[in-house]
Amino acid sequence: MTASLGKRIGWLNTEGLLRLWLLVLAPLSYLFFVYNLVLDYRAGGHSWKQGDWLINGQNGPVRRSFAGDVILPMSDALAMDPVLLVIVVQVVVVALVYVLSLRLALSAGGAAPLILALSPAFFMAFWVTDPLGSARKEMLAFAALLLFAQGVIRPSLVWTALGCALFLVAAAAHEALLLFLPVFWGVLCLAPGTPGARGKVVLLSLTSTAALLLFLSAMGSSRVEDFMTVCAPLLERGVAEHMCQGAIRWLEYDAVHGFDFVYSRTTPELMFWFLLAYAASVAPFAYVAYLTDARRLCAALIILPFLLFLPLFAVSTDHGRWISFHVFAAFLLFAVAIRLGRVRLVRRLNAFLLTGLFVAAQLIAPMHVRDVYFGGPVARVWEEARALLP
C-alpha cells in the first residue's frame, strides 16, 4: 500500500526525493537570504553586500557606479534610506532568480537538473552556507540568463529581450559580469533552428557589442585615487561610515594588487581544501554527464564555464563565489540542453551514489573567501537557529 501510494504521489522514489529536496531548499534558502538582509539593515548595511551597490559617480567617473548612480537619485526622490532601497532591489531580483531557477529545473523533466542542485556551490545552498557571499551583483547576471533561457526554450523574443536588457544593466553595474556573456551564446547554440533564432542572434549580437563598450568604458576609469570621493555622497545621505570600508574602499586597488593579495595568501593547506570543495561542487555534474547519451557535450558544458571564470581566481580571493559562477552557468546550460532534448539520461540512477553526493555536499562546502565550511547549508541553518535560542 505504501509503495502504491508512493508511486501515486511521486515522492517516494529517487526522483521524487530529489524534487522534494529542491522544493524544501528553495523557500528555506530564500527566507534565510531575506533574514540576513534584515540583519544587514539593522546593522546599518554591509560594506560589501550593500556597499557594492552604492558605488557611485556623483563626484566623477567611477567603474561599477551604474547601480549607485540609479539608486541614489531614486532614494532622494522617495525620501528613502539608500541602504533600504538596495535591500528592496536585492529581495526582488533574488526572488526572480529563485522562481525562474525552480521553473527551469522542474520543467526540464527528469532527475538530471535536480541532481545538479545537490552541488554545495549551487546558489540556493551556497548563499545559505556563507551569507557573506550572497546579495552581490551577480544576481543580475543570473536573472538575465534565466530570462534569456526562458526566451530560447519557449521560444519568445520578449523574454529574450528582457534577458539581454537586464544583462546590460549587470554589465554596467560590474565589469566582471561580462564574463557571463559567452554563456548567453552557449544557450543560443543549444537551440539551433528554433523559431525566431535569427532575431535572437541579431539581438544578442547587439547586446554583446553594447556590453563590450561598457567594459571598455569601465576600464577607462579602473582605479579611484581616494575612496572617500565615492563615500562622500553616501555620508551626506546619512549612510553609516562603515559602509565605505568594503567594496568602496577596494576601488583604490587594481588587478595587480589583487593578484599579489591572492598569491601572498596561498598555502598548500588552503589549496587542498579549496580543491576538495571544488570537487564536491562539480561532482553532481560529472555524475549527470556519466548518465547521459551526450558525454562530450556535457563535458564541454562543464569545462567551458570553468575556463570563462578562471581569470577571477587569480585576482580575488572570493574563490567560493567564482565556483558558484561556474556551477550556475553549468546548471543553466545543462538544464536548457535537457529541456531541448540535446541531453538525455540513458542509465539508471544509483541511489547509493546520489546519497554520497548529498552527504558530500553537507560535509564540505566552499565559503566565498577561499575557505570551506563543514556541514553545508543544513549545519549553517542549525547554527543560526541555536544562536537565536535563549
Image (spheres, rainbow, N blue to C red):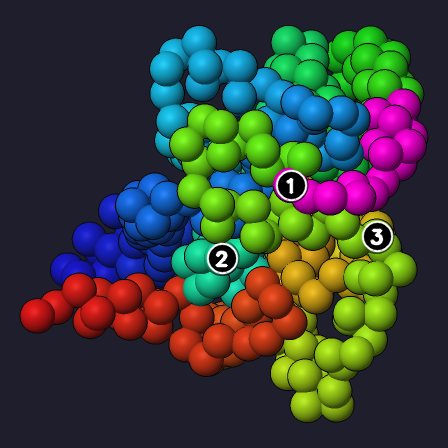
**Magenta stretch containing residue 213, yes or no?**
yes
Judged left or right of residue 69, residue 14 is left
Which residue in the structure is indicated by mark 3? 254
Q: From the image, tell me which residue sits under label 1.
A: 228
Task: Name the outermost residue toward the left.
Answer: 390
Q: Nearer the viewer, mark 1 or mark 3?
A: 1
Q: Name the residue carrying label 2.
A: 132
Q: Magenta span has 30?
A: no
Toward the viewer: 40 or 141? Answer: 40
Magenta-tinted stretch: 212-228
Badge 3 element: loop
Residue 265: % across, % down: 74, 79
The mark that comes first in sequence, 2 or 3, is 2
Q: Earlier in the sequence, mark 1 or mark 3?
A: 1
Position of residue 260 relative to residue 340, above or below, is below
Q: Is residue 316 above or below residue 262?
A: above
When asked about the image quadrant of residue 386, the answer is bottom left
Screen quadrant of the C terminus: bottom left
Figure quadrant of the N terminus? bottom left
Percent of width and height locating residue 50: 50, 41
Q: Which of labels 2 and 1 is toward the front?
A: 1
Q: CA distance from mark 2 to mark 1?
A: 23 Å
* Closest to the observer, 218 or 332: 218
Residue drawn at (78%, 41%) of the image: 224
Q: Which residue occupies the foreground of this view, 239 or 65?
A: 239
